[in-house]
């Protein structure tokens, strides 16, 4: 059972970076070629056997042929060189051979055929056809030709393999050209990110009119680093810069440089920059550059040598830009803290653009972009959806609109309604409903009281966010959930907010212990969340009695050489401070559960009856029991 939290990060935006791609021809493997040659050979054998079967005319000795003539069974004789073809009255034919140089009349007379018999028999003499000669050579020529074809085919495969091996170090960049209207993106197609677009507009001007800057002695920046949470639109903005400037866009991921062989990545970097220089002015975009641009450190057993060579080659290529060359390298990462300092020095990625999660107005604009191709019902209000999705990235909003369209289509409706959008918010956050997850009556009761505990504690604490929905229907890994959303857009978290959130997280744990005298596995995630917040208060934000000190170095989870920057004795103090914060939050939650037990029972019983309580119904329950409702401040 999980309480609902506003996501800080989300999945990466969908990347539409397919363009005109130049790739090598696929080469069949040796086994495929051998199998194909075997099939062709079988067809040739089958065809040759059919030809042989057609030769059904019998060949008989000359003496037997003469007896048939004497018996007048043969009505006509066709002479074709040394071959004699006799046709009987029933139109069947027989073949025989005579001696070379002798006439057919002399030969037949030797075998006793009289002149009168020959006079009644039609004799036709025709010249020997050339096919007879070539026909005798076919059984020899066909195997020779087939063997030669097999040698040529296999040699072609070997040659293709050599070509593939030679192209192993070539760049695999995808290219979007300015005239590709289907893939081209402009700034107007990217909603929100106003400050980022203003910064990148300068890059567009550099590419459009470089002479204006070079005449005054200014140099075009070589590198632009886009930083931000996953799904904030870094790739789309890079494509929009290329679209606005009307230049080719070379796109590939940092991991595409790497292979199992050392040196391949550096070769691909050289090939990529050579391609881009020929197409200049152009933009090279390296997505997830942290895959190759991490801080260099002493390798263990040769590990990371290929990555470091790739990084070194990128640094060298960026230094090798000519001042007049209109080539800009753009890169994106959501982990700028792990990048090598050589990448970030002036002259390389010295322009850094930060993309934040969209605020309410930006979310509404992004939703407006994603609904262009979706028919909407009259009750759809995108402003309400934008208010209910704080912390959502552009990718989350795209997924929300797509899920709402899927829900409408599944229910055989032609338009997307507001109800579809509301349901999709929860689906994107937690996953689909698990309708097959049937709770026993006792489990349903425990879950209802657990979620009611979360909601009641949050409603009684001044700095906790108001409750928007409570549900005991399982979604994803959660057996139930409590959705809370802030009153206004919030960029900073205060100490009081942290303490109230920790107490709210422990509300379900305390409720189970006070109401049922025992606890279940349901609060496991709540305890993890509460402990993580308490430890962050102590070690990162200086919100404890230990003072304004941070005890966790930046990027500590990412370094294999990390060692604690405090002693074991001080580590015990940190653990003690975390325990103190959790104990105080537990006491605050317990006092609320005990004092407001009638309200808790009312909320839990209503949950067991309807399974879902929306914000309006929940606020009515609070007002009925004398608990003031938190008022929303309207955003102008």
Image: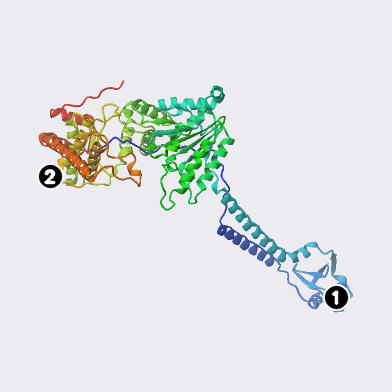
Judged left or right of residue 153, residue 122 is right
Place of residue 3 in the rendered image (x, y in percent of width and height, measured from the top left): 24, 38
Place of residue 404 in the rendered image (x, y in percent of width and height, measured from the top left): 36, 35
Q: Is 157 or 283 nearer to us in this picture?
A: 283
The vertical placement of 198 against 109, above or below, is above
Name, please, the residue furthest toward the top: 636
Q: Is 160 or 469 nearer to us in this picture?
A: 160
> What numbered label is drawn on residue 516?
2
Judged left or right of residue 230, residue 21 is right
| Visible residue check, residue 253 | yes
Crowd around label 1: few <14 · some 14–19 · many ≥20 (10 Å): many
**Quadrant of the snapshot with the C terminus:** top left
Disc 2 is placed on an element classified as helix
Place of residue 305 in the rendered image (x, y in percent of width and height, measured from the top left): 46, 48
Crowd around label 2: few <14 · some 14–19 · many ≥20 (10 Å): few
Judged left or right of residue 224, residue 39 is right
Residue bearing the label numbered 1? 108
Place of residue 249 in the rendered image (x, y in percent of width and height, measured from the top left): 52, 34
The vertical placement of 369 against 560, above or below, is above
Disc 1 is placed on an element classified as helix
**Quadrant of the snapshot with the N terminus:** top left
Q: Are marks 2 and 1 in contact (CB under 8 Å)?
A: no
Q: In which quarter of the image is residue 419?
A: top left
Judged left or right of residue 580, residue 351 is right
| Number of marks | 2
Q: Distance between the residues labelled 2 and 1?
A: 123 Å
């Amino acid at each position: 059972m999980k309480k609902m939290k506003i996501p800080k990060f989300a999945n990466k935006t969908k990347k539409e970076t397919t363009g005109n791609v130049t790739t090598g021809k696929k080469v069949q493997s040796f086994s495929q070629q051998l199998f194909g040659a075997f099939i062709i050979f079988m067809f040739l054998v089958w065809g040759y056997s059919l030809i042989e079967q057609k030769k059904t005319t019998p060949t008989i000795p000359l003496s037997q042929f003469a007896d048939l003539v004497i018996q007048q069974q043969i009505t006509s004789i066709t002479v074709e060189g040394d071959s004699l073809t006799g046709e009987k009255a029933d139109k069947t034919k027989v073949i025989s051979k005579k001696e070379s140089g002798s006439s057919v009349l002399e030969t037949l007379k030797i075998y006793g055929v009289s002149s009168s018999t020959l006079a009644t028999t039609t004799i036709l003499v025709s010249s020997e056809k050339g096919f007879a000669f070539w026909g005798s050579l076919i059984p020899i020529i066909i195997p020779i030709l087939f063997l030669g074809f097999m040698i040529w085919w296999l040699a072609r495969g070997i040659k293709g393999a050599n070509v593939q091996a030679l192209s192993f170090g070539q760049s695999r960049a995808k290219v979007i050209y300015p005239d590709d209207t289907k893939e081209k993106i402009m700034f107007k197609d990217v909603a929100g990110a106003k400050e980022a677009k203003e910064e990148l507009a300068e890059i567009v001007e550099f590419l459009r009119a470089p002479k204006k800057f070079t005449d005054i002695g200014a140099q075009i920046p070589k590198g632009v680093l886009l930083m931000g949470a996953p799904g904030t639109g870094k790739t789309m903005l890079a494509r929009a810069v290329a679209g606005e400037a009307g230049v080719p866009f070379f796109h590939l991921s940092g991991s595409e440089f790497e292979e199992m062989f050392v040196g391949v990545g550096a070769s691909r970097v050289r090939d990529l920059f050579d391609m881009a220089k020929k197409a200049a002015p152009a933009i090279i975009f390296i997505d997830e550059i942290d895959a190759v641009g991490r801080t260099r450190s002493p390798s263990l057993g040769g590990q990371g040598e290929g990555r470091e060579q790739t990084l070194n080659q990128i640094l060298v290529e960026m230094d090798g830009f000519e001042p007049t060359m209109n080539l800009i390298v753009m890169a994106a990462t959501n982990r700028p803290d792990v990048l090598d300092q050589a990448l970030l020095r002036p002259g390389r990625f010295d322009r850094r653009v930060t993309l934040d999660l969209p605020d309410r107005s930006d979310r509404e604009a992004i939703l407006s972009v994603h609904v262009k191709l979706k028919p909407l019902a009259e009750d759809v209000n995108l402003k309400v959806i934008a208010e209910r999705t704080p912390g959502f990235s552009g990718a989350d909003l795209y997924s929300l609109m797509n899920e709402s369209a899927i829900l409408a289509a599944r229910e055989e409706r032609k338009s997307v309604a507001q109800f579809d959008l509301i349901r999709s918010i929860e689906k994107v956050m937690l996953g689909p409903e698990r309708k097959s997850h049937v709770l026993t009556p006792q489990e349903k009761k425990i879950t209802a009281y657990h979620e009611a505990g979360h909601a009641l504690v949050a409603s009684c604490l001044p700095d906790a966010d108001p409750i928007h929905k409570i549900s005991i229907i399982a979604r994803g890994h959660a057996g139930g959930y409590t959705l809370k959303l802030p009153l206004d857009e919030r960029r900073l978290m205060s100490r009081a907010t942290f303490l109230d959130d920790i107490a709210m997280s422990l509300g379900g744990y305390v409720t189970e212990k006070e109401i049922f005298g025992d606890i279940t596995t349901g609060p496991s995630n709540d305890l993890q969340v509460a402990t993580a917040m308490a430890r962050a208060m102590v070690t990162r934000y200086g919100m404890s009695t230990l003072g304004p000190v941070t005890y966790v170095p930046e990027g500590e989870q990412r370094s294999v050489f990390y060692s604690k920057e405090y002693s074991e004795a001080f580590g015990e103090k940190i653990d003690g401070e975390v325990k103190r914060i959790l104990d105080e939050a537990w006491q605050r939650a317990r006092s609320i559960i005990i004092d407001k037990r009638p309200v808790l029972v009312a909320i839990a019983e209503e949950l067991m009856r309807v399974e879902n309580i929306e914000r309006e119904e929940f606020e009515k329950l609070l007002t009925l029991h004398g608990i003031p409702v938190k008022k929303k401040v309207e955003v102008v």
